[in-house]
Image (spheres, rainbow, N blue to C red):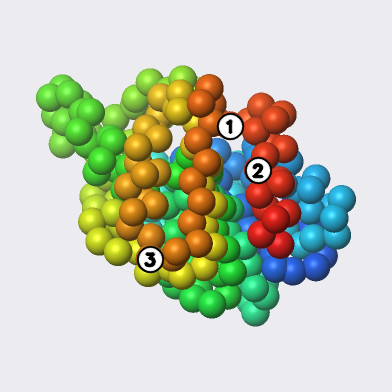
Amino acid sequence: MPHVTSAQGVALAYEYQPGDGPVLVFCPGYGSDMTGSKALALLEFARANGRAMLRFDYAGHGASGGAFVEGTIGSWRDDARLVIEQVIPEQEIVLIGSSMGGWISLLLARELGERAKALVLIAPAPDFTERLVRPSLSEEQKATLAKDGVIYRHSNYGPPQPFSLKFLEDGAAHLLLDGPIAYGGPVRILHGMQDDAVPWRLSEKLLARLESQDVELIFIKDGDHRLARDHELALLTRIVAALL
C-alpha cells in the first residue's frame, strides 16, 4: 500500500483513486480508518462516476504506523494535511469528515482556503474533547488520567477506547465552537437523532458558528452515530453528487 512518511518517521497509508476533480478527501473518525463503510461507499461512488478520491489513515489507525495513544487532534490534522500536500498538492478538494474527522475537516478547510470547495460532515464532533469527554469524566477517571496519562472508556462501536491526557489537552488548543468559523463554501451536515456518541444538538451549534450562508443540516430521526445503513449511505452519496 502506498504511504507518505511524516516528520516523525511514521508511514501514513493512503489510497488514491484517479478521476475528475475536485478530489473527494475522506477524513475518518476516532479509531476508524479508510476501510469503513462510509469511505467504501464513497469510493464506489467515485469509481462509478469517474471521480477522484483520496482516502488515508491517521498515525496509529488502520494500515498506518505509529501508536494510537500518541495521537492528538493536532497531529492527526497534520497527518491529513501531509497526505493531501504529497498526493494532491494543487487540486481542489471536497472534504468529507466523519465524527472526529468532521473536526479535522473544519481545521483543514481553514488552512486550505479556496482549495476546499465544499464540506460534507457526518455526525461531526468539533470540540468533543472539551464538550463531551471532559464533562463526562468521573473523579476516578480524572485521577487515573493524572496518574497514568490515559484512560479507557466503554464504546458501543467496538472495544474500550483509550483517551490520553495529551489528547485532551491538545484538543483544547483547537476549539472551534467558541467563535465564528471562517469558511464560506457550501457545507452539508448529516446527523442522526439517536446518536449516543455525539448529540445532534452539537451540529446545531456548528451551523450557528459557520460563517457560510450555504449550510444545510439534515437530521435522520432514527439514525445512530454510524449512519451506515444502505439508505443513509445512499443519502450521503446523493449529497456529494449534488455538490459536484
Q: Secondary structure at mark 2?
A: helix
> Could one spot residue 48 in this view of the protein?
yes
**Amino acid type at image mark 1:** Leu
Mark 3 in CB contact with mark 2 (< 8 angstroms) = no
Q: Secondary structure at mark 3?
A: loop
Quick one: 212 or 17, which is closer to the camera?
Answer: 212
According to the image, label 1 marks what residue? 227
Q: Which residue is mark 3?
A: 211
- Residue 67 showing in the rendered view: no
Q: Residue at x 44, y 65 (%)?
A: 212
Q: Are marks 1 and 2 in contact (CB under 8 Å)?
A: yes
Identity of the residue drawn at 34% across and 54% down? 208
Which numbered disc flags the more N-terminal residue, 1 or 3?
3
Question: Which secondary structure, mark 1?
Answer: loop
234 and 78: which is toward the camera: 234
Question: Mark 2 sits on what residue?
Answer: 236
Residue density around tag 3, few if under 14, some if 14–19, many if 20 or more, within 10 Å: some
Residue at image x 40%, y 35%?
200
- Residue at the location (85% across, 55% down)? 49
Three-letter code, disc 2: Leu
